[in-house]
Amino acid sequence: MVYEPFLIKDYRCEEFNELVSASDENQTANLELCVQLLQYLDAHHPSVSVNYAASVVLARAHKFGHGTPIKAIESSFCLSLRQHAWIPVIGDILYKPSDVYFLRPNSETSAFRRYVPHLDISKVSLRNEDFIYNILGIKSQVTYQTMFELLMKWSCDLDSEPLWNLVKQTNTSDM
């Protein structure tokens, strides 16, 4: 805990927010722009990565040139990367990174490629795993929970939220 005055050094990118907010309105027109942004951020991850973390610095230490952070947190820019639908998936649709899978063609989960939104590797070639998984939060594999959701959707036409509400209700009842 911090008991004395502190400064938060944050990184924002209003230009990124403007570019991807426009993609929410007209996805097909901005698909190529999002592909270019994604490839640029992946290719330049080592130099851009300093913008993904904000820091808390004690004001006294900053005043005397000892700006050593006492806590690192995710920056506003990093959070923006995750909150907008700007990742191109198969079918020329843009999704939020947390809803996207990066399924390699010959992996054991490649059978699920037609059932989950996955990165369109014909349009985007990503190489930096830290950027893909840790910064964006793209999923690397289909979990058992996702398989269960898919099976319930196919068999009962039950969407994810009602399904988990039903499971939660069943677990808390005294049956």
Image: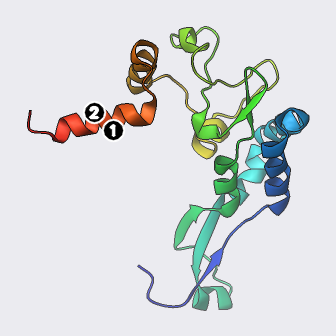
Q: In the rendering, at what x and y percent does residue 79 appear?
A: 64, 55
**Picture quarter containing residue 45?**
top right
Query: Seen in the image, is 158 located left or right of residue 125?
Result: left
Q: In the rendering, at what x and y percent does residue 32 appear?
A: 89, 33
Mark 1: which secondary structure? helix
Residue bearing the label numbered 1: 165
How busy is the neighbourhood of tag 1: few (under 14 within 10 Å), some, or many (20 plus)?
few
Q: In the rendering, at what x and y percent does residue 127 appear?
A: 72, 29
Residue bearing the label numbered 2: 167
Residue at (44, 88) in percent of width and height: 3
Q: Which of the pair 22/5 is nearer the observer?
A: 22
Residue at (45, 82) in percent of width and height: 2
Q: Amino acid at mark 1?
A: Asn
In the rendered view of the protein, which quadrant contains the C terminus?
A: top left
> Where 63 sits versus 70, above or below?
below
How busy is the neighbourhood of tag 2: few (under 14 within 10 Å), some, or many (20 plus)?
few
